[in-house]
Amino acid sequence: MGKVSCSLTVYFEDPFWVGVFEVVENEKVSASRVLFGAEPKDYEVFELILRKYTGLHFSPAVATAVRALGKNPKRIQREVRKQTSATGIGTRSQQAIKLQQEQNKQIRKTRSREQKEAEETRAFELKQQKKKEKHRGH
């Protein structure tokens, strides 16, 4: 069984606060995006993790290179500072979320296309029926 790591990045994306969960498992990353309204408090983030983590919809997994973190505490502190100072989310996470959005978009398009075709065939059948009723007695 491989190593699994999960991280949560909270940042401000005008006009909302956004949280991105990144799960790295078997050298593949998947991500989920959560919108907060106002700036979330620590207890709100903790409650989200405890209560709603299992209900999150993660994007399909995208292959990534996984690095082993060093044990040097100063290096870890530097990396944490770099992550907190950088705005936005990791490019792999962005790709994973974009892939999920594209899949949802394709599903919506096919569903709306099917509904449109069904409506057109129904309208055509109704027109044909009215046409037959008009010429029935002649």
Image: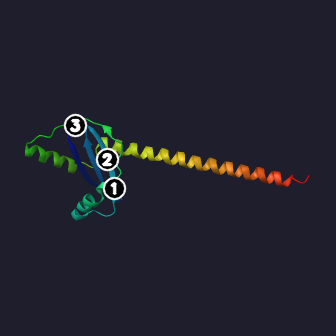
Instruction: Note whether 54 is above or below 67 in the view shown.
Output: below
Q: Which mark is residue 69?
A: none
Tell which circle, 1 or 3, labels the residue nearer the N-terminal end.
Answer: 1
Instruction: Say what secondary structure mark 3 lies in.
Output: loop
Amino acid beneath label 3:
Val
Question: In the rendering, at what x and y percent does residue 122 appear?
Answer: 68, 51
Residue shown at 73% from the left, 53% from the top: 126
Is residue 12 visible in the rendered image? The answer is: no
Amino acid beneath label 1:
Gly
Amino acid beneath label 2:
Ala
| Residue that numbered label 1 is attached to | 55
Residue shown at 25% from the left, 59% from the top: 50
| Residue that numbered label 3 is attached to | 66
Q: CA distance from mark 2 to mark 3?
A: 15 Å
Q: Are there few (<14), some (14-19), or many (20+) residues within 10 Å of tag 3? A: few
> Mark 1 or mark 2, which is nearer to you?
1
Tell which circle, 1 or 2, labels the residue nearer the N-terminal end.
Answer: 2
Question: In the rendering, at what x and y percent does residue 86 appear?
Answer: 24, 48
Q: Nearer the viewer, residue 32 or 77?
A: 32
Q: CA distance from mark 1 to mark 3?
A: 26 Å
Instruction: Say what secondary structure mark 1 lies in.
Output: helix
Q: Which mark is residue 31?
A: 2
The answer to whether the residues at label 1 and label 2 have Cβ atoms under 8 Å apart is no
